[in-house]
Image (cartoon, grey):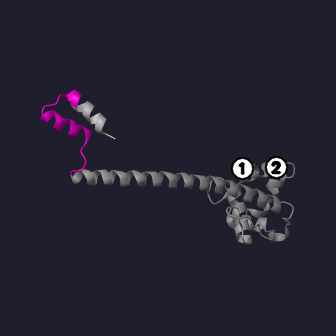
Amino acid sequence: MTAKVEGYGQAENIGEEVKLMFELFDTDRSGMIDREELKNVFRTIDSNVWTEEKLDEMMKDFDKNGDGKLTMGEFWGWINGHGGRETSDHRPELLAKAVEVDKAKGVIQTAQLDEFRKRKTAQEAKDVSAAAIAAERAEGKRVSRKQWIQEKIDVGFTREVAIELYQKADQ
């Protein structure tokens, strides 16, 4: 059975389900799940069932290399009930939690992507406008404020009159 959810949190096969659940536990993104990471997730699900003793037993049974961490392979064996262990009592809860967390991440990532696109579009519009102004200046169709005022002073206007004329003409 697989979780079918639109967008994020969608798992189409057992491998994707296990990956979602692994990522739920692997909060530091190290590629390994340590005992603290296990404990933190189990606290959010049912701390009465997942006692220290049960965590110790699970780690003893599935941490095959004895390093105190579960690799993806070791996690796969545990979550899929290899070695004769039944996982039906916790797998649905873990998958539901993993899907929920993945959906939340998706919403955040979508919002961040939308904000990035808005900033990029605004910057592109600014760049186009700046390029148009630069082209007009190059063609002699547009002058800077400083240049305009200096030209008026050069022909005999006072600085104050030149500034006032510029302000009236500048749209």
- Asked whether 157 or 80 is in front, the reply is 157
Residue 69 is a magenta residue: no
- Rendered location of residue 62, percent (x, y): 76, 63
Image quadrant in which you'd find residue 157: top left
Residue type at mark 2: give it.
Glu
CA–CA distance between discs 1 and 2?
11 Å
- The residue sitting at 78% across, 65% down in the picture is 79
Q: Is residue 117 visible?
A: yes
Q: Residue at x 21, y 51 (%)?
A: 140
Say which residue appears at 81% left-offset and 52% top-offset: 45
- Residue 75: x and y in percent read 73, 64
Type of amino acid under label 1: Glu
The answer to whether residue 150 is magenta is yes
Q: Quadrant of the C terminus?
A: top left
Q: Residues within 10 Å of mark 1 (few under 14, many from 20)?
A: few
Does residue 13 lie above or below 151 as drawn? below
What residue is disc 1 on?
A: 36
User: Horizontal placement of 65 versus 61: left or right?
Assistant: left
Q: What label sits on residue 52 in the rendered view?
A: 2
